[in-house]
Structures are given as C-alpha cells and as structure tokens.
Amino acid sequence: MNLRQAVIGVHHHDCWGTLSTEKFPEINMKENGPVIIQKNHSGLIVHATWDVSFPKVNMFNDYLDSLKRFSKLKTVRVIGKGERTALLKTVWKANNSSYDAVIKNNCFYSSPVSQINGYEIYTVIAEKPMEIKKLMNELSVIGEAKMFKIGDFQREETPFTLTDKQLSALQIALSNNYYAWPRTIGLDELSRLAHLKRRTFQENLRKAEAKVFPNVLDTVLFRQN
C-alpha cells in the first residue's frame, strides 16, 4: 500500500496563531505535546503548548505583547525561556477546529502542527489521494489552504538510527566515562567489557559516532548562532 504524504499550509481567517506570526515572520512555533480540545455550549476550548524559536528576546517579548489583542486567546503563559527559545502554554476559544478536519477526512498527523509566517502547517498522511483532496476542500472553508508538498510517504532512516551493535558500543563508552577529560579508560578496556575484540568494538563505536556526533555538533552550532 502506497501512503500519500502532504504538507499543507492554512492561513486561518480567525486564528491568533496565523495572524500573530504573520506580523512576526521570524517567530516560529511548533506544538509540544498533545492538543486538547474541549467542547462547551459556546464552542471549543483548545489547550496547546508550543516550542517557540526567535532571533532575539526583545522580539519575543514584543510578540507576547501583541497577543493581548486577541480576545479569544484566554491564556498565554511562558513556562520557560532562553536566549532564542521558549515554551509557551496557550488556551483559546474557537468556533471550529482544523484539527478535527484532519481526523474526519481519514488523514493522520505525521508531525506536530507548526505556526510559521502566517500559516498553520500540517504534515499529514493518507491511504488515498482523494482523502487529501477532501481535506484541502474542508480546510479551504476555514481559511486559505495551500499545498506546499505532496508525494508518496517514505519512512526515511534518521541520522541517529543505530544498529544494536552500534548502540551497545556507544552505551558502554558513555556509561564508563570514555568521553570524560582527562580520559580514564581506553578502547582495550571497553572492548573487554563488551566481550568483543578491540577491532570489532572500535568499528562499532566509530560508526555510531559518525552518525551521532556531526548532527549533535550541527545542533549546538545552530543554537549558538
């Protein structure tokens, strides 16, 4: 069975996330954890927590001030804040839910929803192309729906996908303080702990390091810039 994956952007006519990030295009928000939707006599109450990234703290503070103008946004609370990232808790009232539209059309989320530059970004998968077409039609009622990308769903191996042997070698190295400075244990001792020949253990460890370390360094350097 060939699953289809689509990346859809929605410029929501009545959404604080869309309207606020449109005014602050350098603010990026991504859901952290589940979205909780409660129904009451007046509509929907939506609870969500967001990972927010921004270039400067003063811009984030200005962004928070701008959220005060949205009357349906009932709760805005900064749970934690760094120099370029923050964790933001929100609760808001809504008349309809684009989250429900995804589920009703037999589509499934394959990543958290993001709010970027005036668009809610949905990455969804479906068993049939017609289901994505129906979702697009329903989202078009809520706002301007734009198809950013569509194609066959392919599960790609991430850079951190290690074999069992590579994972074991890395765990043994870490648990025995191999990466501490000054180093107090060598490959000979680690290989004995792993019950492997030195050459075999070293090969497993080096392959694990080659997968993990470049990506860790990229992440650290990105956050420093």
Image (cartoon, grey):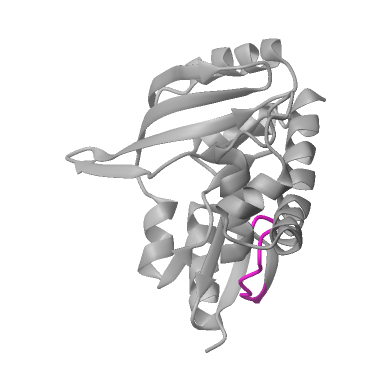
Q: Looking at the image, which residue sits at the far bottom?
A: 1
Vertical arrangement, residue 18 with respect to residue 61, above or below: below
| 160 within the magenta span | yes
- The part of the image, by quadrant, that contains residue 30 is top right
Q: Is residue 161 visible?
A: no
- The part of the image, by quadrant, that contains residue 159 is bottom right
Relative to 97, is 142 on the left or the right?
Answer: right
Bounds of the magenta span? 151-161
What percent of the width, then of the height, locates residue 217? 78, 37
Residue drawn at (43%, 62%) of the image = 102
Residue drawn at (41%, 28%) of the image = 90
Q: Looking at the image, which residue sits at the far left?
A: 41
Relative to 201, is 4 on the left or the right?
Answer: left
- The quadrant in which the C terminus is found is top right
Counting the numbered discs, the total is: 0
Q: Nearer the viewer, residue 197 or 4?
A: 197
| Predominant SS of the magenta segment | loop
What percent of the width, then of the height, locates residue 171? 56, 48
What percent of the width, then of the height, locates residue 44? 29, 41
| 200 within the magenta span | no
Q: Is residue 68 visible?
A: yes
Q: Nearer the viewer, residue 197 or 25?
A: 197
Vertical arrangement, residue 55 with respect to residue 19, above or below: above
What percent of the width, then of the height, locates residue 112? 51, 49
Q: Nearer the viewer, residue 223 or 150?
A: 223
